[in-house]
Amino acid sequence: MSPEGLAHALEGYVEALRHQVAVAEAFFFGRLTEGMEGLMYLPEDIRLRIDQIIWQTSGGQAIDPTEKESQSLIAAAIMKSVDERMDL
């Protein structure tokens, strides 16, 4: 891969991570509509992983995303997914 191609691929990867962080931020600050819309634009495998993290963290209990505590849980799950994607 050329240096330009590698740079372009890395820029795309970083931009995808930024988008995911922005979605987490929307949930954390209670902007539910923005957060839900942002989730829809994440790749399916990322959404599934976030759902899995939420399911595990909540002990298999359903959550209500309109509740502040649930929004914080969703934000934390999204950030854990970012962490995993970065392999930290």
Image (tube, helix red, strand yellow):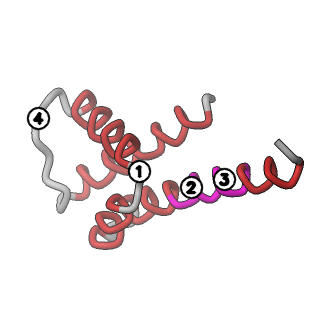
- Label 2: how many Cα within 10 Å (few below 14, some 14–19, many 20+): some
Give the labeled residue for mark 3: 14
- Answer with mark 1 or mark 4, whichever residue precedes in sequence: 1
Give the Cα distance between marks 4 and 2.
29 Å
Q: Give the residue type that dot 2 points to.
A: Ala
Residue 68 vertical position relative to residue 52 in the rendered view, above or below: below
Q: Which mark is residue 61?
A: 4
Residue 50, picture quadrant:
top left
Q: Give the residue type that dot 3 points to.
A: Val
Q: Main secondary structure of the magenta part?
A: helix
**Residue 43 lies within the magenta run:** no
- The secondary element bearing badge 3 is classed as helix
Q: Give the residue type that dot 4 points to.
A: Gln
Q: Kindly check if marks 2 and 1 are in contact, taking CB atoms under 8 A apart as contact.
A: yes
Give the labeled residue for mark 2: 16
Residue segment shown in magenta: 10-19
- Answer with mark 3 or mark 1, whichever residue precedes in sequence: 3
- Label 4: how many Cα within 10 Å (few below 14, some 14–19, many 20+): few
